Image (cartoon, grey):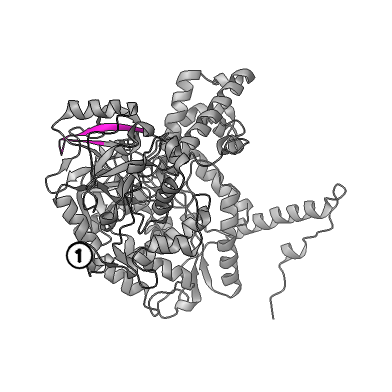
Amino acid sequence: MSAPPTKEIANLSVSAGGGKGTAKRDALLANEAKVQALWEAERAFESDAVPGKTGVDNPDEKFIVTFPYPYMNGVLHIGHAFSLTKAVFRAQFERNRGKNVLFPFAFHCTGMPIQAAANKLKAEVGAFGVPPQFPEDDPEVRAKMEAEMIAAAEAKAAKAAPDKKAKGGKTKLVQKSGTGIVRQWNILKKMVPEEEIPKFVDPLYWLNYFPPIGVDHMKNFGSGVDWRRSFITTAVNPYYDAFIRWQFNTLRAKEKVLFGKRNNVYSMLDGQVCADHDRSEGEGVGPQEYVLIKLKVLMPEHGQDRHAKIKALLEKEAPRSVYLVPATLRPETMYGQTNCFVLPTGEYGAYYVDATDEVFIMSARSARGLSCQLFDTAKNQYYTKEFGKITCLETFTGDELLGIPLSAPNATYDKVYTLPLLTISMGKGTGVVTSVPSDAPDDYVALQTLKEKPDFAEKYSITPDMVEPFDVVPIISIEGYGDASAVFMCEKLKIKSFNDRAKLAQAKDETYLKGFTMGVMTYGPHKGEKVSDAKPKIRDEMIAAGQACLYFEPESRVMSRTNDECVVAATDQWYLAYGEESWSSAVKKHVLNQDTFNAYDPNALSKYDYTIGWLKEWACTRQFGLGTQLPWDTQWVIESLSDSTIYMAYYAISQVLQGVDNL
C-alpha cells in the first residue's frame, strides 16, 4: 500500500482561477513551482552512499543515470529536452521502485566551438563597432548579399553535379537563418541581453555565463538532478583538470598514448586536426584511403585546337612525365581499363609534385589535400616541399582534356582516351575517373552511350577511334554474375541510360559488394586469387612500380566551425592507440560477455562491437582551444572527446572535491 501524500502535496489543486481557457494550465504551472520548491527545500534528488544499497554485494539496489553533458556555447534547446526526457523518466521510475538513484549532470566546455565563436564575435566588433552596424542592416544591401549567396551556392552545386537540375527556392542557409547571413552578435542577441554581448569576446566568459542558466532551465524542467555533483570542464575547473591529467598520465604509463604522424581530418584554416566537436558538418566522418592511378598523358594526335594547352605543357615539362590521376578504391580492377573520364565543365589544374618530380592533373580541391599528405611514410617525405602548398603550372577545363591519349598502367590496351562523364562530382576524389566497364555499371553505361549515340559523342568532339575499338575486358569472375558483373547487372535491371539513377545505384552496390567478397581474379599475375586477397597486393605492387600512390580525403564533406572545408593531413600528433591488440581484445572480450556487460539492446551491442573493430588510432590533442593541457607536452590541449571518455566516474567524487554550488 502506498504512503499517503504529504500535507504540501495534498493541498495542491487544479481548480485555481485564471483566464478563460487557461485555468487548468495556470494551476498546473503554479503547482509545478510549489513542488519544485519543495524538492529544493527537501534536497529530494541528492543521493549518497547508503549501507546495503550501494555495495557490490547488493548491486540491484542502486541505479545511476547519466546524460551526455551538453556543450555550453549557448542555452539548452528543445533537442536537449527531448533526449533528456528518457533519462528523467528512467531515473524516476527506478526511484519509484525503491532504488538509491543517482542522476548527476555537468556541462562541457572543451574544444574549439566556444573559442571560434568568441573569435568571430571579436572580429565583428572590431569591424562593425558596438553595437555593430552590419552592412545587411540596409534592406537593399541585404537583398543584394542574399542574391549573391544564393547564386554562388547554385553555381557551386551545378559545378559539382551538373546533371542535376537546380531546384527553386531558398538555400538551406537562408531557410534556417532567415537571411542566410549569420552573425555571431545576432546569435547571442537571441540568448543574452545586448549590453552583455561584448563580454563574450572572452571565451572564458561563456563558461561562467551559460552553465548556471542551464541549471535553472533543468530545474524548471523538473529533471531531478543531484546538482551538488555538477561541474564544467577545461582548466578553469582545477579539479576536473587534475582528473583528466591523471587519466592521461595513467594511459601514457600503460603506453596507450603514442606520438607520430597520422592521417586525420584537418582544417587548414585552423591549422589543426578537426575533431567531431570542432565541426559544423560531417560529424563521425574519418579519413578514406584512395589509390591514385597514374595515367601518363601522351602527345595529342587528332589535331584538335582544344589540346593546345596540354601540348604546350608536355613540351615545356619534358622529359618530366605528366599524369591524369583518378582516385580509386579498386586498384585490382585496373586490368579492365578502357578509357578515362573527366567532367567537361569541371575545372582542373596541372600540379607539380616535388616528391616524384612529376605533374599531376587533378582538381584544385584534391591537390590542396595532397599537399598535406605523406608520399613516403618511412622517410617522412611529403608530396610537396612545403606543407599545404602546391604549385599549379596550368589550368584546364574538362573539355580541354577530352580526347587526350593516355597510357594506363596494367591495362590490356596500349592507349586509351579521355572521355566525357556528366555525373562526376568535383567534390569527391580528384575529378578524374578511371573506367572499368566490366565491373563498374556507371562506366559501362557511359561507354555504351558514346558508342551507340554518335550525336552525343560528336557534341564533345569524341571521334569513333576513341571509343569503338575498346570492348569490355573480363577480369573478375563472380558466381552467378559471370566475368563481367557490370554488364550482367545492367542487362538484368534493363539499365539504358544515366537517367536510371536508382537502378544504377543498386547495380553498383551489388557488383562492388559481390566483387570484393565473392570475386576471383581471372586476369593478371594474381589470376585465381580471391579479390579480397589480391587487392592489397596489387595496390602495393603498383605503388612500388611507380604506377600509383596513396591519397586520402574525408569519407564525406567535413566543414569546420570556422567554415573551412577540411582535408586529410598527415601531422605530428599524440594519439590513443585504441587498436592496439591487447587493449582492443580486452575491451571486446568485456563487451561481448553477457556476465560483465549489459548493452540493454542487441542493436546497441552490435554497434559497440563494430566500433571496437574500426577504431584504431584517435588523435587526442589539439594545438589551441579550451581544455586541459597534455601533462608532459603542454603545447598540446586534450581534445573535447578525449577528455569525455570517463567523466561519468568523476561524478562519484566531484562534490567532495569541489563542494556544493561549484559552478
Q: Residue 214, how many percent across, how many down?
A: 55, 47
Who is closer to the viewer here, 145 or 58? 145
| Location of mark 1 (residue) | 526
Answer yes or no: is residue 568 visible.
no
- How many other residues sit within 10 Å of disc 1, few (<14), some (14-19) or many (≥20)? some
Q: Quadrant of the N terminus?
A: bottom right
Question: What secondary structure do most residues of the magenta stretch adopt?
Answer: strand
* Left or right: where 535 falls relative to 101: left
Q: Residue at image x 42%, y 51%?
A: 448
Q: Within the image, what quadrant is residue 269 found in?
A: top left
- Residue 627 as seen in the image, left or right of residue 296: right
Above or below, comparing residue 193 to residue 143 in the picture = below
Above-or-below relation of 202 to 256: above
Image location of residue 266, percent across then percent down:
32, 42
Image coordinates for residue 2, horizontal then vertical, percent: 69, 77
Question: Image height check: is 79 above or below 200?
Answer: below
